[in-house]
């Protein structure tokens, strides 16, 4: 089997990379370890598609948003007359992640992307800094698959790391990676009762002890986050034994009435690229979900008849490897809005969303944009025919905390896919392509750069 472009990892970045490469004429294969695509959006049940980026989000990230919207697979909140920039909790939408799986398959089919599912990439075959092939494992056993160009969209930077690329890890800099969280969805919520409670107890929500008040209008808020006094009460009664993040319990309303996504549990001091740590995380966080769900039913008004609809197939990983590339994007670049000559992503504004790795702390900071991502952050040092995209691109921790949200990962992925196709077409390595050609193709696809 030989392809022009192989994309490893079918999350928001990998989906866009495969579409970008195939639509630009490359014979493309997308490899994914699950039997469905979506990455954190589906396997992690991360249901919140960032609001603010939608205003400026473009290309495949916007196409996905529009398609979800036209299918009724989005719970959107009217943001008219909200002061700008409105914040993360106030705006945005809840996504039906099951529908997203169907959409992802139809997008792949339309673009003629070949798929290899339930397949894990386990090794890289290199020769003098050139990536020749990858070794994958599935029910057929181990196989080697070759391509002219590869894209690492694994989130964890597995392919780049296996190829020998250097990388940063959160915990090598300051002893921690952001904590991982097991998300779940509940149904059967009496929304009116829940919102009445919140309206009558405004201090319960978005009133973060150190970060200030975020939610202006609960009826417009896509994320309702807090429930501080209820948590306190349950603790006193012995109904909550584990620690919750200082932001409290996050609930995102989903398109089907009475259904919510819950993001709250976490276990500090674990390494997301360590098999034993991930096993421990999975076991312990499932027990936390069990306890939290009982808490939700007993304490949160409107949730007394709720039930668990689904628990994410995997613990959601916020941070692991960041591959060292030709350029390391910094938060100062984002703050100053440095407009790189090789910019491939432009977004209106950013936020750094850092969750503690050693405790339950959390810091959140808004950065007014625009900000840009350079193509060089997608090119690993040394390895020639490999591009990286999504949350593992070359960036500092704080910059990664800004670019890791799904629409931006998708925008980065699209650029990587188009760049790989151009490299194959011009018979050169990705770092040698003509940047203006890449930018022209992206612009023609409707991407703002
Ligand atoms: C708890 C939590 C809450 C979040 N909240 C939000 C939010 O509200 N809004 C937002 O926009 N973002 C949010 N994020 C961030 C966002 O979900 C991720 O940063 C984003 O999904 C990263 O996209 P990606 O495509 O780079 O990686 P991923 O989404 O992780 O996708 C990687 C894909 O690669 C596959 N893969 C990995 N290794 C291999 C391998 N070796 N072989 C084969 N396949 C492999 C995986 O199965 C997966 O499908 C949140 C993340 C978490 C964990």
Image: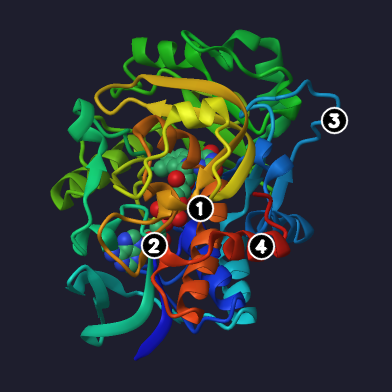
Q: In which quarter of the image is residue 73?
A: bottom right
Q: In which quarter of the image is residue 398?
A: top left
- In x, y percent, where is residue 134? 26, 76
Which marked residue is nearer to the observer: mark 4 or mark 3? 4
**How far apart in space, not on screen, are marks 1 and 3 (Cα)?**
27 Å
Around disc 2, counting alpha carbons within 10 Å, would you say few (fewer than 14), some (14 to 19), or many (20 or more)? Answer: many
**The N terminus: image quadrant:** bottom left
- Sequence-wise first label, 4 or 1: 1
**How far apart in space, not on screen, are marks 2 and 1 (Cα)?**
22 Å
Determine which residue is flagged by label 1. Answer: 41
Residue in the image at 35% along x and 21% along y: 239
- In x, y percent, where is residue 317? 35, 44
Residue in the image at 49% along x and 84% along y: 27
Seen in the picture, residue 202 relative to 26 is either above or below; the reply is: above
- Sequence-wise first label, 2 or 3: 3
User: Which mark, residue 387?
Assistant: 2
**How far apart in space, not on screen, are marks 4 and 3 (Cα)?**
33 Å
Determine which residue is flagged by label 3. Answer: 80
Query: SS class of the residue under badge 3?
Result: loop
Around disc 1, counting alpha carbons within 10 Å, would you say few (fewer than 14), some (14 to 19), or many (20 or more)? Answer: many
66 with respect to 153 (left or right): right
**Given contact means CB atoms under 8 Å apart, are the residues at marks 4 and 1 in contact?**
no
Q: Is mark 1 within 8 Å of ligand 1?
A: yes
Which marked residue is nearer to the observer: mark 2 or mark 4? 4
**How far apart in space, not on screen, are marks 2 and 3 (Cα)?**
39 Å
Which marked residue is nearer to the observer: mark 4 or mark 1? 4
Determine which residue is flagged by label 4. Answer: 440
Query: SS class of the residue under badge 1?
Result: helix
Query: SS class of the residue under badge 2?
Result: strand
- Sequence-wise first label, 1 or 3: 1
Query: SS class of the residue under badge 4?
Result: helix
């Amino acid at each position: 089997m030989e392809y022009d472009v192989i994309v490893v990892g079918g999350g928001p970045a990998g989906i866009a990379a495969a579409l970008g490469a195939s639509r630009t004429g490359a014979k493309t294969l997308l490899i994914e370890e699950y039997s469905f695509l979506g990455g954190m959006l589906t396997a992690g049940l991360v249901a919140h598609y960032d609001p603010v980026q939608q205003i400026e989000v473009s290309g495949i990230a916007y196409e996905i948003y529009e398609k979800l919207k036209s299918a009724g697979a989005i719970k959107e909140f009217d943001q008219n007359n909200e002061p700008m920039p409105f914040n993360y909790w106030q705006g945005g939408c809840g996504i039906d992640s099951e529908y997203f799986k169907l959409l992802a398959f139809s997008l792949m089919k339309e673009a003629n992307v070949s798929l290899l599912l339930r397949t894990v990439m386990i090794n890289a075959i290199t020769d003098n800094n050139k990536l020749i092939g990858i070794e994958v494992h599935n029910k057929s056993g181990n196989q080697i698959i070759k391509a002219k160009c590869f894209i690492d969209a694994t989130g964890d930077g597995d392919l780049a790391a296996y190829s020998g690329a250097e990388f940063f890890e959160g915990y090598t800099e300051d002893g921690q990676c952001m904590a991982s969280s097991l998300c779940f969805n509940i149904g059967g919520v009496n929304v009116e009762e829940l919102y009445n409670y919140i309206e009558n107890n405004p201090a319960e929500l978005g009133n973060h002890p150190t970060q200030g008040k975020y939610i202006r209008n609960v009826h417009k808020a896509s994320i309702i986050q807090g429930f501080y006094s209820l948590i306190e009460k349950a603790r006193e009664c012995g109904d909550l034994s584990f620690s919750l993040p200082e932001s409290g319990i996050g609930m995102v309303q989903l398109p089907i009435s009475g259904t919510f996504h819950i993001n709250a549990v976490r276990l500090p001091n674990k390494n997301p690229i360590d098999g034993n740590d991930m096993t421990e995380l999975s076991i312990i966080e499932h027990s936390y979900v069990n306890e939290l769900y009982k808490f939700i039913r007993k304490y949160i008004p409107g949730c007394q008849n709720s039930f668990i609809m689904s628990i994410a197939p995997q613990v959601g990983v916020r941070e692991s490897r960041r591959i060292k590339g030709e350029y390391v994007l910094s938060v100062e670049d984002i703050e100053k809005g440095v407009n790189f000559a090789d910019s491939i992503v432009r977004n209106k504004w950013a936020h750094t969303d850092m969750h503690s790795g050693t405790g339950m702390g959390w810091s959140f900071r808004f950065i007014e944009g625009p900000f840009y991502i350079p193509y060089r952050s997608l090119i690993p040092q040394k390895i020639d025919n490999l591009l990286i995209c999504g949350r593992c691109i070359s960036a500092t921790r704080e910059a990664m905390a800004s670019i890791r949200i799904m629409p931006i990962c998708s925008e980065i992925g699209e650029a990587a896919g188009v760049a790989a196709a151009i490299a194959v077409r011009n018979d050169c390595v990705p770092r040698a392509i003509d940047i203006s050609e890449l930018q022209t193709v992206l612009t023609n696809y409707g991407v703002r750069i």
